[in-house]
Amino acid sequence: MLNEPFFSEYLTDRQVEVINHFIDIMGFELNEFNYLKSEEFMTDLYPVDVAIFAPTKDFNYYTLTTSGLSQYNLYKNFTRVELCMVLPPEWKPTLDRKENMWAPDLLLDIAYQVVENKMGVRLGQYFVMNTPNGQLPYPEGTDALGGIICLPEMFPLQILEKEIEHSYTRFLQVVPFDKNGLSKIESMGPADYILYDLHDSDNPKMVAPMKKFEPKGIDKIIRKNEDTLKAK
């Protein structure tokens, strides 16, 4: 029997299956779980939401995944996909703060491009955000201009595919890139960028880079109060 979040009545069966895929493979806990419901996304079709899993002792990173993108069978000969992202433990899912919203926004922006343009998703494909006046899309929390599609190498191999509703869904990872990264992708090509920039001699380097956020004004007061409550 599936583990179901208390709000599962508002989710499709496929979305519940996506959540349980990460719980089963990674050992994530529902009591350490956030869910960003985005009903406004393509409301005439299927909703695409973002699930957020907290770090564990065995995987000390936040994990984000789209939930519902695989409802769209977008292109002949391309499998259904969900997109995930890995963030460092210092990122916090306090989504009322703009500096923390960039990560789920990035996943949803890419998902929207995929659905809107009826794209198949493939390894090495990269997406640049649509931004006004060429400005950075999420300047308060990141320097990211977009993301590149990779294999989820930081996860166990079993995370890659799951049979859902009689067809296979593939789980691919989005790794954000900044202006310098985009320049390298365009000059080196996506394959070499993934091979040389997103790997070192020991491990894949696929954790989303963070921009140091300097709180001002009321944010400083709020954080000071939070630290006091935590006895820091």
Image: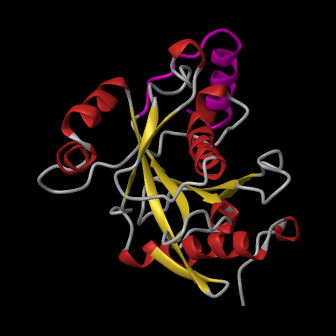
Residue in the image at 39% along x and 67% along y: 155
Q: Residue furthest bottom?
A: 1
Task: Write down the quadrant of residue 132 in the picture.
Answer: top right
Bounds of the magenta segment: 210-232
Quadrant placement of the N terminus = bottom right
Quadrant placement of the C terminus = top right
> Does 88 sit above or below residue 101?
below
Residue 221, horizontal then vertical, whole percent: 68, 16
> Does 118 sit above or below residue 175?
below
> Does 89 sit above or below residue 7?
above
Q: Is residue 227 found inside the magenta-colored segment of the image?
A: yes
Task: Write down the quadrant of residue 208 in the picture.
Answer: top left
Left/right of residue 152 with respect to residue 52 in the rendered view: left
Residue in the image at 53% along x and 32% along y: 129
Residue 40, horizontal then vertical, whole percent: 82, 45
Left/right of residue 129 with respect to residue 51 in the rendered view: left
> Does 11 sit above or below residue 201?
below
49, 81: nearer the viewer? 81
Left/right of residue 114 with respect to residue 175 in the rendered view: right
Residue in the image at 58% along x and 50% along y: 114
Q: Residue furthest front?
A: 76
120, 99: nearer the viewer? 120
Residue 27, horizontal then vertical, whole percent: 53, 74
Q: Residue furthest left?
A: 201
